[in-house]
Amino acid sequence: MLILGIETSCDETAAAVVRDGRETLSDVVVSQIDVHREFGGVVPELASRKHIEAISPVIEKALEAAGVEVSAVEGIGVTRGPGLIGSLLVGIGAAKGMALALKKPICGVNHLHGHLFAVFLERADVKFPFVGLVVSGGHTSLYHVRAPLDIQPIGKTRDDAAGEAFDKVAKLLGLGYPGGAIIERHARGVDAGHLRFPRALLDNGQFDFSFSGLKTAVLRSTEQMFGVERRTDMPGSFHAVVAPDLSQTVPPAVKIIAAAFQDAVIDVLVAKGLAAAREYRSEKLVVCGGVAANSALRDRMVHEGRLSGIEPVFPSMRLCTDNAAMIAARADILLAAGLADAPDFGAKSRW
């Protein structure tokens, strides 16, 4: 089946054409990082506007790159949620219009399930059941994927997601946006020494996550280290404590904090991910989502997995970040099972 996938859950406008849920014929992504960088995070209103500008050209480019006419598309999959409502509605509107015009089936795809099934675009050896760890800017979740249509959540974040914590810590350290890649770069090869941040819920025998306390611990340590008092005039904010001149060398103290923070996040993700795989007797642990592109996480997970007899499986870097190929791959399964949606389905900010 030839599926057109559309993804607009946050700040990437993406379209892809995938054949039979396995073969990627095209995968086009337009990022908005430069638009949101000056604000230190995604601004929903700006994201929606940029999706409106980009959606039609991105779809056209995906079809052209795949070498197929739009009439050859046999089904359309579009991200229904979770995500930013305004952004989601742009993609859903475009997908519905095409489905109605072409008289083709359409289905709304769970974005997180899309991440889990991105692995099948590159690895034919992943079999059901398996445990999947989705680590992104908005979500940190564990799933027991028992079958293509049987995905059971077994753990989730109780507050901040790992990716969100990376962005906020990068902001308080004055390092910029997006935080994941920046913190990884400045933490590379740095020994955090005696600086150790809390690993919340690490030994509670459950699979939920919590990164809010870690984020706050980093804030307090940074304030103390740089002699900055708490901003009492900014209730509820997560302000920038350090304002280094990014044209100069980043202070060693900032790199140490970044390394200690990253170590804490990785420790939790590795420990809980592998523990879940052992609990559910899964030989493979699929690790996906934007944070899964972190090379330190990949290295640690592979090392610890080898000691545990579990193989961590990561999609390629491109398929870790938001993309439409994973949405098309998931839609192929849903449509083949006869699970097309009625044309009046809506967006879901949470799922």
Image (spheres, grey):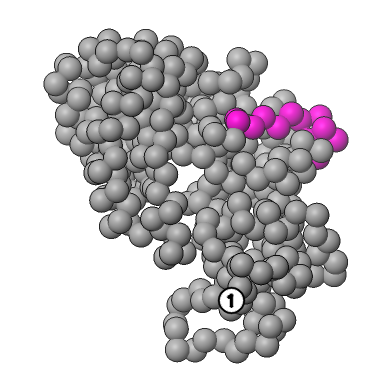
Q: Residue at coordinates 36% horizontally, 13% vertically from top-left?
A: 67
* Quarter of the N terminus within the rendering: top left
Q: Residue at coordinates 52% horizontally, 28% vertically from top-left?
A: 118
- Residue 70, by quadrant, is top left
Q: In the image, is residue 265 part of the stretch drawn in magenta?
A: no
Magenta span = 304-316
Task: Name the side, left or right, on which 348 lies relative to 196.
Answer: left
Locate residue 114, reporting x and y percent. Answer: 46, 32
Q: Is residue 104 above or below residue 202?
A: above
Residue matched to label 1:
243
Name the element at disc 1.
loop
* Quarter of the C terminus within the rendering: top left
Locate residue 206, reporting x and y percent. Answer: 65, 50
Task: Name the side, left or right, on which 103 lies relative to 24.
Answer: left
- Residue 245, by quadrant, is bottom right
Is residue 256 shown to the viewer in this render?
A: yes
Q: Is residue 54 above or below residue 84?
A: above
Is residue 334 shown to the viewer in this render?
A: no
Q: Nearer the viewer, residue 325 or 196?
A: 325
Locate residue 74, reporting x and y percent. Answer: 29, 13
- Residue 60, by quadrant, is top left
Q: Residue at coordinates 39% horizontally, 25% vertically from top-left?
A: 16
Q: Is residue 205 above or below residue 172?
A: above
Q: In the image, is residue 308 part of the stretch drawn in magenta?
A: yes
Q: Residue at coordinates 47% horizontally, 51% vertically from top-left?
A: 138
